[in-house]
Amino acid sequence: MDIIEFDEIASTNAYAKENIDKLGHFDIVLAAAQTAGRGRGGRAWLSQRGGLYFSVVLKPQAAQPAFTHAMALSVCDTLKSYGAPAYIKWPNDVLAGGKKLCGVLSEAVFENNFLKGIIIGTGINIAQSEIKTDKPAITLKQLGLMPHRKKLLNDILTLFGHNYNRLLKGGFDAIRAAYKANFPYLGKKISIDTGRGIITGTALDLDGAGRILVKTAGGVEAVSLGDMDF
Ligand code: BTN
């Protein structure tokens, strides 16, 4: 595992994508600031100094959507161990008090249908003076926590390594109980914007593939991706 570190870069995900051939499994691209940080759904991720911005390069045999779930789980459990009241908003946001602490953007790199790698980009709000996301956001500093950036990265990567190995052996099922323990929305009314429409209903469960099962007026739907609201 190598850590390629930048003081400032456009986007650690973009760098990892462009350099995928040179990067190895579990290499990390880390930046103190990003000038063109990318978020989900084509949104920007404002990445001023004071936050933690990194991308993990994975080179698995096959992609699993739950790699991103595993990162959200690893961040959430690490932040909880530091004392943050963190929880997961499916599929891969980490919140505290309804405000976003962390976002994960996964990108797959293919060449001629061959999977060259998967990039798990993670941004954590630690102590930036200005945070701007699509939804209300919060920093660890505002929660009274001031973790050392590198220690936080190290603790997250250690946990992610464990969760990743469990996932490879047993799929999402292997981390499902741990994920559910951090997911307070079961039994609650939610809506999910899938990009093709809004699904509204009660969150029933998460299935063995990390999909959320929603009881809607028309029956139970298994949703694999989308922006969840509540
Ligand atoms: C989201 O929209 O919630 C996902 C945000 C992901 C941001 C991280 S910061 C490190 C990596 N590089 C990027 O350009 N984006 C991700």
Image (cartoon, rainbow, N blue to C red):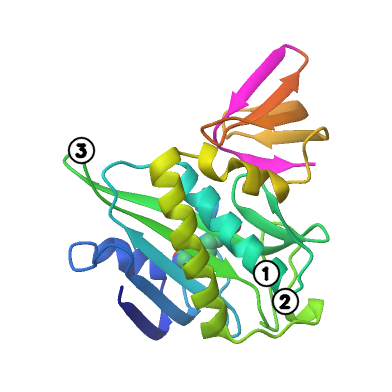
* Camera-side mark, 3 or 2: 2
Name the mark on residue 219: none
Amino acid type at image mark 3 = Asn
Count numbered badges in the picture.
Answer: 3
* Camera-side mark, 1 or 3: 1
Q: Find out whether the residues at labels 1 and 2 contact each other: C-beta distance under 8 Å.
A: yes
- State the residue at coordinates (71%, 48%): 181
Magenta span of residues: 218-230
Mark 3: few/some/many CA within 10 Å (<14, 14-19, 20+):
few
- State the residue at coordinates (47%, 77%): 34
Residue 123 falls in which quadrant of the image? Answer: bottom right
Residue 18 point in image, percent of width and height: 26, 64
Amino acid type at image mark 1 = Leu
* Residue 21 in the figure: left or right of residue 36: left
Mark 1: few/some/many CA within 10 Å (<14, 14-19, 20+):
many
The quarter of the image holding the N terminus is bottom left
The quarter of the image holding the C terminus is top right
Within the magenta stretch, is there residue 224?
yes
On the question of residue 13 being in view, the answer is yes
* Camera-side mark, 1 or 2: 1
What secondary structure is found at the residue carrying circle 3?
loop
What residue does disc 1 label? 79
What secondary structure is found at the residue carrying circle 1?
helix
Q: Nearer the viewer, residue 185 or 18?
A: 185
What residue does disc 3 label? 113
Q: CA distance from mark 1 to mark 3?
A: 37 Å
What secondary structure is found at the residue carrying circle 2?
loop
- State the residue at coordinates (60%, 45%): 91
Amino acid type at image mark 2 = Leu
What residue does disc 2 label? 140
Residue 228 falls in which quadrant of the image? Answer: top right
